[in-house]
Amino acid sequence: MSNENGISALQKNRTLLVGVAAAIITLLVLLLWPAPSNEPGVQSAGDTAMVDHSDMTKHDDHAGHNHQSMENSESMMSPDPHAGHGAGLTQEAEVWSCSMHPQIQRDGPGQCPICGMDLIPVRKDSSSDHQSDRSLTVSPAQRALMKIATVPVERRFPTAELRLVGKITYDETRLAYITAWVPGRIEDLLVDYTGVAVQEGDHMVELYSPELLSAQEELIQAVRGLADLSKSNVQSLRNSARGTVESARDKLRLWGLTAEQIRAVERSGKASENVTIYSPASGVVIHRNAQEGMYVDIGTRIFTIADLDAVWVQLDAYESDLQWLRYGQTVHFTTEAFPGKSFQGVVSFIDPVLDPQTRTVKVRVNVDNTEGRLKPEMFVRATVSAQFASDGKMIDQSLVGKWVSPMHPEIVKDKPGQCDICGMELVPAESLGYAKSADAKAPLVIPATAPLLTGTRAVVYVEDQTSDRPTYVGKEVVLGPRAGPDYVVESGLSEGELVVVSGNFKIDSALQIQAKPSMMNPEGGRSGGVHDHGEQ
């Protein structure tokens, strides 16, 4: 047991002596080792002899030191472009940024609070001296690489082309109805199916009516009484007999008999059991609502007749299309039945109420159909062209200085007057939303690719024509309606300014990286990111 304790004590003393010796050797090495040179890239001859060639080629990523041979000492005087934390780049760096999240910018090295990557130094750019200035200066070579293109702001009348869909319907002003004017029974339907083309005056229905039969008898008796009193010397009796005859005639006329039918009853002196009802208009029978032997009452609809020489086109227009639509505009449309054939009509009505289901407004177009090609319920594709002037007015050369009927837009005259169809007074075209003269002021127009839209703002980049280098300045503008490939500018730009139409997203991205005001960050400044977990 005593021998084991002695061996253990001996081992402990040996370990202690080894540690003391190692500490003494380390201290001597530190005291005798020569200090390194302060100048970068310069080594003493003694150092070169002590360092092995294989050790000189090793690269320490954490310390950022490169050991190279004496033959490459000249290359060490300039920073390595691939080195992340080179001494020369650090001296020129203004801020440290994350390569994955450029909005993260710090005054010194560290780690990105979002992804944890090491921040890299960003070289100082002379164009970023003023962080509040929304401008970017590039070299001509950079401009070519960014493919920046500009166009001048112009004053002209932009043209918008709307594409609408709809279908053909009957002209409601050309519908005629055959109804029963007296109670009775239908003895014969002379037109027994729909789709038949009829002319005004064609016989349609044979109707038996006790009331009509009685009224005819009254007329016959009145005529006979007037004949008996014609030789009377009493003038009042003759006048009373004439009044009775006229009343009997008016009664039959108001019950639907024609003047010829009434005269036939007077000539024959015999009442007809069945009375023929004639068509009041020419057209096509589109509805048949009765059958033979059916009893009808006053007002019962028997036939519906539509005149198809003129039809309506009902188009669906979205809310965004309403600013381009005006009463009296010309509309061109096509149908599947006649490919390549274009028809045209005139806008006669714009529904004042929006359909809550489809979110559209009905636009009615009057169309001539004397050729009979257009059929109700046909689907159509229509286009409407509109030239926009200032103050929301439209330019239509055919209506400048004209007077238009408020009910029939096809009636257009050079002077005030009355409508040839309805007799209403004509109104000036400018009261319907058209420019008063062809010399109306044209609005400012820019291409649709120029503005960057955020939903609440519009940013346009304008070239600074006074700068000796390509410089682009961001401006917030107020846009009007879009007219095809163009936007109308309400404010923020002047005629002749050069706006960027290609490469504007690249300019905006460069400004975001430099923490300047941009499309999505109008205030500019450095951002710490959304998920800021603090620097590690």
Image (tube, rainbow, N blue to C red):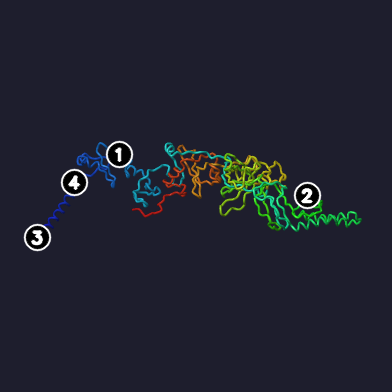
Residue 209: x %, y % from top left: 74, 57
Q: Amino acid at mark 2?
A: Glu
Inter-mark Cα distance, 3 to 4: 40 Å
Q: Which sits earlier in the primary sequence, circle 2 or circle 3? A: 3
Residue 535: x %, y % from top left: 35, 53
Inter-mark Cα distance, 1 to 3: 63 Å
Q: Nearer the viewer, mark 1 or mark 3?
A: 3
Regarding residue 473, the answer to whether it shows in the image is yes
Q: Nearer the viewer, mark 2 or mark 1?
A: 2
Regarding residue 425, the answer to whether it shows in the image is no
**Residue sitting farthest toward the bottom:** 1
Inter-mark Cα distance, 2 to 4: 143 Å
Q: Which residue is mark 2?
A: 260
Asked whether disc 2 touches disc 1, contact meaning CB atoms under 8 Å apart, the reply is no
| Frontmost residue, 225 versus 316 | 225
Q: Nearer the viewer, mark 2 or mark 4?
A: 2
Q: Amino acid at mark 4?
A: Leu
Q: Which residue is mark 4?
A: 32
- SS of the residue under disc 3: helix
Q: Nearer the viewer, mark 2 or mark 3?
A: 2
- SS of the residue under disc 4: helix
Q: Which mark is residue 77?
A: 1
Q: Which sits earlier in the primary sequence, circle 2 or circle 1? A: 1
**Residue sitting farthest toward the left:** 3
Q: Nearer the viewer, mark 1 or mark 4?
A: 1
Q: Which sits earlier in the primary sequence, circle 3 or circle 4? A: 3
Q: Which sits earlier in the primary sequence, circle 1 or circle 3? A: 3
Q: Which residue is mark 3?
A: 6
